[in-house]
Image (cartoon, helix red, strand yellow):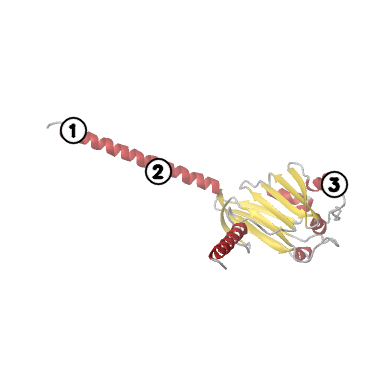
Amino acid sequence: MSIAGRVAWCCAVLCCSALVVACSGVLKPQYEYEEEVYLDLDGSATLNLNASVPALVALHGVDLPTDPRARLDRDKVRELFARPGSSTTLSLSRRDGRRFVHVSIDVPDVRQLSAIRPFSWSTYRLTRDAERVDYHQVVGRAAGRDVTNVGWDGSEVIAFRMHVPSDILFQNSTADVRRGNILEWEQPLTSRLQGEPLDLRVQMAPESILYNTLLLFGSTIVAAAAAFAVVLWWIARRGKTGGMTASPA
């Protein structure tokens, strides 16, 4: 191989390696079912659900067609997640030959989620005192409704994800904490269908990360202003002392 060819080959290898490294932090596993909670310290929350229709049928026993060619009634899907006092958005997609449902729900109290049928398998607890806020969610048994010929091969995984609004004091996730205080609990779909429970626990600081950041930023500004004032005072005093010393001469 000529020198030019070797250089071109090395450049191609380096480019491919850089692309793999760059994409490794962007791409994430494709889950068959995932619940993602954005929690606020006042108890309000947004829950984003991304799930295949067969997973919704099997896990929650809802009456929806698992055939991807069948018509999926959006209003019927929306009714599954409707609750007074909450707002819901809905969209649909396809992947791996299956229809997927994407739902976002805002609730003023995270504990109200258990009143929504697809989330009634969970119990939610949120308590707080002067030192910490405790979040505890137990995901109970699934409906276990049988679905066939939907393209599953037994490797499907589901996930429960949580965005924590303040410093984490304790958590029982088996995965590493991701940037932005994101916790994740995974479970094979087969285990979820068999009813293996999930226990999600988080203890967090009572002040939000944003509050602490603003407090630190404000303290830094005050300290800088105080230091600047001291420097001005010292310069003014030095100039006044110098003027008084030079006056008799």
Q: Looking at the image, which residue sits at the far bottom?
A: 1
Instruction: Estimate the x, y position of residue 151 in percent, counting from the top left.
Output: 81, 62
Residue 112 shown left or right of residue 134 in the figure: right
Report the side of 212 relative to 90 (left or right): left
Residue at 79%, 60% in the rendered image = 142
The image quadrant that residue 5 belongs to is bottom right
SS class, disc 1: helix
The one of 208 and 175 positioned closer to us in this rendering: 175
The residue at the point 65 percent across, 52 percent down is 126
Residue that appears at 50% across and 44% down: 214
User: What whole-number distance in Å separates the C-alpha atoms at marks 3 and 1?
Assistant: 90 Å
Q: Earlier in the sequence, mark 3 or mark 1?
A: 3
**Dot 2 amino acid type:** Ala
The C terminus, quarter of image: top left
Instruction: Pinpoint residue 60: horizontal percent, then vertical percent.
Output: 80, 56
Q: How many marks?
A: 3
Depth order, front residue of 23/74: 23
Give the residue at mark 1.
244
Residue 208 in sight: no
Q: Which residue is mark 2?
A: 223
- The relative height of residue 187 versus residue 90 in the rendered view (above or below) is below
Pointer 2 local density, CA inside 10 Å: few below 14, some 14–19, many at least 20:
few
**Residue at the front extreme, as displayed:** 2
In contact (CB < 8 Å): disc 2 and disc 1: no
Q: Amino acid at mark 1?
A: Met
Label 2: state its secondary structure.
Answer: helix
| Towards the viewer: 161 or 45 | 161
Position above or below: 146 against 206: below
How many residues crowd mark 1 within 10 Å: few (<14), some (14–19), many (20+)?
few
Point out the tag, 3 or 2, that comes first from the N-terminus: 3
Query: How far apart are labels 2 and 1 at the CA level?
Result: 32 Å
